[in-house]
Amino acid sequence: MRREARALDTIDRPGPGVADSVRLRDIEDFVSIRGRFRKAGQTPERTDFLAPYGDPEDPAEGPQVRVLCTTDGLRNDDSHEGTFPARCLGKVRDWNPGTGELTIEAIAIFS
């Protein structure tokens, strides 16, 4: 298991706090993520942003957080070109341990 994925998955590890841990796909609450995002794709309905997590050698190839946004809710300017620092408030929709991708449905992005 990758080091970054292991840091996010404490279910099967012994030690303090294990009883309080949950699998990422079972999170029902809101999460706040801060990172350096880049636009990964856009349709008239949806815009996806990606941000690396951990410390991969190549941030574009390592584990990623994918943030799903409604396109019509985004500002219509050039602020989403290239990479940009932002905080995302959203809900966890999926965790893929094979690819190391965490998918969040955004409620708000603050850049």
Image: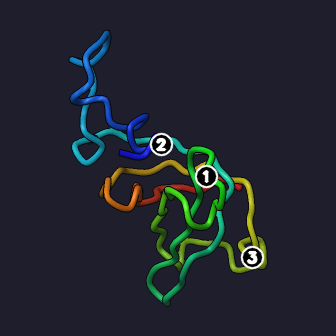
Residue drawn 69% across the image and 80% down it:
76
Question: Split into 4 quadrants, where in the image is the C terminus?
Answer: bottom right
The residue pinned by badge 3 equals: 81
Between discs 3 and 1, the one toward the N terminus? 1
Measuring from the top left, give residue 50's x and y in whole percent: 56, 65
Q: Amino acid at mark 1?
A: Pro
Q: Is residue 72 above or below residue 107?
A: below
What residue is shown with label 2?
Answer: 4
Judged by depth in the image, the label closer to the viewer, 3 or 2, is 2
In what element is the residue under mark 2?
helix
Mark 3: amino acid = Glu
- SS at circle 3: loop
Residue nearest the observer in this picture, 9 or 39: 9
Q: How many marks?
A: 3
Crowding around mark 2 (Cα neighbors within 10 Å: few <14, some 14 to 19, many 20+) is some
**Which mark's residue is nearer the viewer, 3 or 1?**
1
Kindly identify the residue that appears in the image at 56 percent across and 68 percent down: 49
Circle number at residue 56:
1
Instruction: Locate residue 32, reporting x and y percent.
Output: 51, 41
Q: Split into 4 quadrants, where in the image is the N terminus?
A: top left
Measure the C-alpha gap from mark 3 to mark 1.
Answer: 22 Å
- Location of residue 38 with respect to 63 vertically, above or below: below
